[in-house]
Amino acid sequence: MTATTAKNTTLAALTLGALGVVYGDIGTSPLYAFREALAQSGSSIGANDIIGVLSLALWALIIVVTLKYVLFLTRADNHGEGGVLSLMALAHRATDGRWPIVLILGAIGAALFFGDAIITPALSVLSAVEGLKTVPGIGPMMSLPVILGLALAILVALFAIQSRGTARVAGLFGPVCALWFVSLAALGLYHIADAPQILLAFNPLYAAEYLASHGTTGLFVLGAVFLTVTGAEALIADMGHFGRKPIQLGWLAFVWPSLSLNYLGQGALALKTLAAAEASGQPFVNADWFFIMSPDALRAPLVILATLATIIASQAVITGAYSLAQQGIALGLFPRMTIRQTSADQRGQIYMPVINWLLLAGVLLLVFGFQSSSRMAAAYGIAVTGTMVVTTMLAFIVAWRGWKWEPVWTALLFLPFFAIDLIFFGANILRVIEGGWVPLLIGVAIIALIATWRRGRAVAQRRSGEQGIVMADLAPSLAKRPPQTVEGTAIYLTQDKVHAPSALLHNLKHNKVLHARNILLTVTTAPDPHVPPADRLEQRPLVGGFVAARLTYGYMDRIDVPSDLGAAGLLTGTGGASFFVGRNAIRAATRPGMPLIPLLIFRFLHRNAADPTAFFGIPTNRVVELGSQIEL
């Protein structure tokens, strides 16, 4: 096999894999997007209305997904990694960490993504199961309780298997989604001949005319049209797994044509139905256009395929939520949570129990609360449009400050994207009462949690420093009057580079001994996804035999402190090595540094944070925990 052939084979394999992970969400939008957009047009629908709505959908795919995400934002990667937090890290580095707005935008984007992660499984799976109502012979039996029961069973099973990992079945995602997109294209081609004039939808004048002539109704339709581009964020969020070229190739050569053909087919079928209704003097009735496109004999297999596609789309969003939470922990936005590696071969295969069960609880509440995909669709757009606005703003900062682009030309380039994002966001805000309040509520709750956690940590570190002893004063005094020395190496984990770790002070106070070798270790996170193992450790000697060391990891690296210290030769010697960890208890001070409610929330988060030794990969039989109290 030549090098070119091998390269093409790898590209094809990565592109196929991207179909199942990157495009699962946007690929299931035809199940409900055109139906919901047409439903917002009102009861009096004409041929120009159908063409106008479809034109809006097609041009949303062209401008938002193709131009903005596929051709531009895939280039705004952080050493191959993408997503809102990677953009935040790039912008943070470009501004030297001096712009608080960067952190605020990253927190907002992360919060809204979690809202998306809750809505996507509920909406997509429920819409697929609702397709059973169109299957001949089965439809009459599909009552609301039956549909809800089937959807809930699928969703509970999906979240329940997460702890086992998805590496074994992930290989099927790409082929199943490839079959799904082929089916989308085939169904669309089959029906375009019903009304060839539907091809006029490629003329943007129909979209502009529709918006100009429909006033407020046009904005509601625009909010529903945005459902066609939900999932676009996954294009940049999963760049680290597949790379830029497979994602671009998959969209331009496969996904975009399939989606466009399917929407054209749905529009053509709607035009045919409208003509038949006008001929018979009957009113036009909006329908589940996607499923009725298929012949009756193929309806049941199509529902099964659609259900599989929505499960894959949901899986991609769940995995994305794990990855985002992992990045957020590393960047200090969230408290430590248990992270389990579910695959020995794939670093990205992780499972986070807390995130998993919180997502499932939110999904079940949505299904029980809305009970239909049409009612739930109103809740979808705000989370996605909000994330897109944040993404555009962060990308502008990266291009201006990081890439050193001319600010005027950069603004002119980004202004159309930003304006379109704001228009879509404004159109979706109009549907707050219908269900748009759900992602807003989720987003506000997560932003409040992030702010509380960061504020609490800052106050705790300040109070701890006030109660501590400066290491530059302690080390010389210990050198002059050394306590009893024992063999071995003591590693004191600390985030304070100035003051002596509380665990060291307690060891001296209660055990009255000092180890022969003492390392003050700080573990930090770089604004890069990965740091090479050879570049992670920095160390400098201190007075009295102490060593100040710092391990720096990328925000997507797996942390393994003993391995990295051992590789540097810091754990060698007689007596073994022990890791000393200070376990701080938070209690209210006479003059609290935080308001009462945030303080109670921070205490809860601090108390329930994952064990730091497990988070750092330290064996429990080598850990010594020494407690202390901090008054906030």
Image (cartoon, helix red, strand yellow):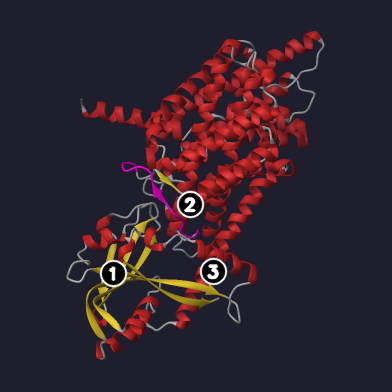
Q: Residue furthest left?
A: 573
Q: Mark 3 to mark 2: distance in Å?
A: 19 Å
Q: Is residue 189 magenta?
A: no
Q: Which residues are magenta?
A: 334-346
Q: Position of residue 366 (x, y in %)?
A: 65, 41
Q: Nearer the viewer, residue 311 or 394?
A: 311
Q: Position of residue 299 (x, y in %)?
A: 58, 16
Please give the residue where the numbered disc 2 appears in the rendered image.
325
Could you classify mark 3 by the number of other residues whose Cα lies within 10 Å: few (under 14), some (14-19), or many (20 or more)? many
Q: Name the residue located 51 percent from the left edge and 46 percent from the top edge.
A: 356
Q: Is residue 337 magenta?
A: yes
Q: Nearer the viewer, residue 5 or 174?
A: 174
Amino acid at the residue labelled 3: Gly
- The disc placed on residue 578 is 1
Could you classify mark 2 by the number of other residues whose Cα lies within 10 Å: few (under 14), some (14-19), or many (20 or more)? many
Q: Position of residue 450 (x, y in %)?
A: 55, 60
Please give the residue where the numbered disc 3 appears in the rendered image.
456
Dividing the image into 4 quarters, which one contains the N terminus? top left
Dividing the image into 4 quarters, which one contains the C terminus? bottom right
Q: Nearer the viewer, residue 471 or 209?
A: 471
Mark 1 or mark 3, which has the lower sequence index? 3
